């Protein structure tokens, strides 16, 4: 009884803090905390459509991996750009202009920390990305790296004052110094690792970790993003197809991954993105065939969840709240998502046969775990075309890290926890086994 009183007192205190701290108003959004999703797909769940390999788009049915890659995939990628994300900027050259060692015994001695200055040739000039890279202490050869974009800057993302405050835009709840009130509230509500990945855990498991501030590419703010997107949008692009922030972030991820891949200390490059960044890592893997593994956690509409279901966060919701994320064309489908020529299972399929983990939480109905599992089932034939085992899952509470396409759901709400990262690392261990040094 005493514990129950204390618990509700604590919750009331946190609620009061939310009312007193306007910077954290976004964190009170109750849509992320709802009744739990079912453990099994509802019997009336509609399959993903269009059927992945069926005749369509002026093409006959797809019967081989070669036909998929050479005929269907280019058509789908073009449609995702024209209908949802906007034009992805043309690939540019990327180089590492400077590498500075920051701490040879960082994260409690788990590894070393470096700061890289990465230069990307963009359509309108050079973009400079401040990249923090940590290597495991015991590495004896090339190691896989998790590349994780962040919203608050590397100083907070890696929880160290050895890195500078971010130069670009950060949301109001991002305090530039680790351990301050706003970050503490965010972690309380959305999980310990929502703002900063568990660097020591990742390094101790034998992985490198790379982090950068997304504002180095495009800031996540509708007013500020406009000029940056205009500079990245290819010349001659129709106004309805101008580059969206998700497409720009995906483009940036692909270039930063190439910079990492050029370092002899690094082996495979894995992407991890949560929520809106989960959308970006999926598109990045679809446009960049050299990326090796993707973890997209709670990516929802415009990510791994089916748009045509109109469940959770709908097309109308996401395009009205975050118009800068997508091409203006996507908003035309608000309230009538079934008019889309494509759906998100086809985006997942563009990544096949590389490993993809789709993360979810039972009470995160806004991100639509059911729609995400339906998308995974709809995408599975692309993996089968490449000789991978069949994937068809009806239960949401089954996680198989040995499957190259896998669905993961824990209890709880929207956010990133230690349980999540343990699953992500188990998945990477299983999928990259034989490629990592002992």
Image (spheres, rainbow, N blue to C red):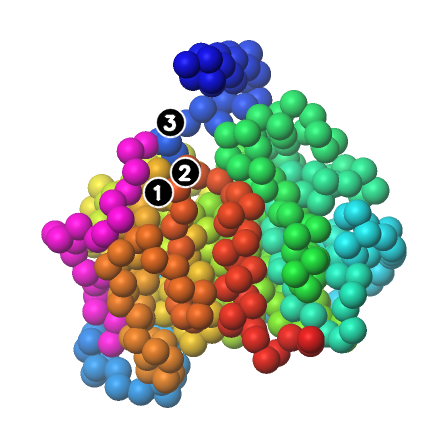
Marks 1 & 2, CB-CB < 8 Å contact? yes
> What's the residue at 37%, 80% (across, down)?
388
- Name the residue: 78% across, 73% down: 140
Circles 3 and 2: CB atoms closer than 8 Å: no
Mark 1 crowd level (few <14, some 14–19, many ≥20, 10 Å Cα): many
**Which residue was labeled with disc 1?**
362
Residue at image location 73% in from the left, 54% down from the top: 131
Residue at 85% x, 52% y is: 105
Chain part drawn in magenta: 34-53
Task: Label the magenta part by its dominant secondary structure.
Answer: loop
Left or right, 305 with respect to 2, comes to left
Please, which residue is most extreme toward the front here? 1
Q: Is residue 299 above or below residue 438?
A: above
Residue 218: where, in percent of width, then height?
60, 47
Closer mark to the observer between disc 1 and disc 3: 1
**In this view, 338 is above or below 175:** below
Residue labelled with disc 2: 412
The answer, for residue 375, to whether it is visible in the render is yes
Q: Quadrant of residue 319?
A: top left
Give the percent coordinates (x, y) of residue 65.
Answer: 36, 85
Kindly state the secondary structure of the residue where label 2 is placed.
loop
């Amino acid at each position: 009884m005493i514990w129950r009183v204390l618990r509700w007192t604590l919750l009331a205190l946190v609620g009061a803090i939310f009312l007193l701290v306007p910077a954290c108003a976004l964190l009170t959004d109750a849509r992320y905390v709802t009744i739990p999703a079912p453990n099994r797909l509802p019997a009336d769940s509609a399959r993903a459509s269009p059927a992945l390999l069926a005749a369509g788009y002026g093409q006959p049915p797809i019967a081989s991996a070669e036909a998929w890659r050479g005929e269907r995939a280019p058509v789908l990628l073009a449609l995702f750009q024209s209908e949802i994300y906007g034009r992805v900027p043309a690939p540019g050259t990327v180089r590492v202009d400077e590498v500075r060692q920051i701490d040879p015994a960082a994260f409690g001695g788990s590894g070393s920390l470096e700061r890289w200055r990465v230069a990307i040739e963009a359509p309108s000039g050079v973009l400079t990305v401040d990249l923090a890279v940590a290597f495991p202490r015991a590495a004896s050869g090339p190691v896989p790296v998790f590349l994780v974009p962040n919203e608050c800057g590397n100083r907070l993302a890696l929880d160290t004052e050895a890195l500078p405050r971010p130069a670009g835009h950060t949301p109001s709840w991002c305090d530039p110094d680790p351990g301050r009130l706003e970050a503490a509230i965010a972690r309380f509500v959305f999980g310990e690792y929502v703002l900063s990945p568990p660097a020591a855990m990742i390094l101790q498991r034998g992985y490198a970790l790379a982090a950068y501030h997304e504002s180095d590419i495009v800031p996540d703010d509708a007013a500020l993003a406009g000029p940056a997107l205009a500079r990245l949008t290819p010349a001659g692009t129709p106004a309805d197809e101008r580059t969206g922030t998700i497409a720009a972030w995906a483009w940036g991820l692909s270039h930063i991954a190439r910079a990492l891949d050029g370092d002899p200390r690094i082996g495979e490059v894995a992407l991890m993105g949560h929520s809106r960044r989960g959308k970006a890592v999926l598109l990045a893997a679809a446009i960049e065939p050299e990326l090796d593994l993707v973890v997209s956690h709670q990516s929802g509409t415009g990510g791994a969840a089916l748009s045509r279901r109109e469940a959770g966060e709908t097309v109308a919701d996401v395009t009205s709240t975050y118009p800068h994320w997508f091409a203006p064309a996507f908003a035309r489908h608000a309230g009538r998502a079934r008019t889309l020529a494509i759906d998100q299972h086809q985006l997942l399929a563009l990544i096949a046969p590389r490993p993809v983990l789709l993360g979810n939480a039972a009470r995160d109905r806004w991100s639509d775990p059911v729609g995400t599992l339906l998308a995974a089932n709809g995408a599975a034939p692309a993996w089968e075309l490449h000789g991978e085992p069949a994937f068809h899952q009806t239960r949401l509470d089954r996680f198989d890290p040995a499957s190259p396409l896998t669905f993961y759901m824990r209890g709880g709400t929207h956010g990133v926890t230690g349980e999540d990262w343990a699953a992500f690392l188990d998945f990477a261990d299983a999928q990259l086994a034989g490629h990592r040094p002992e």
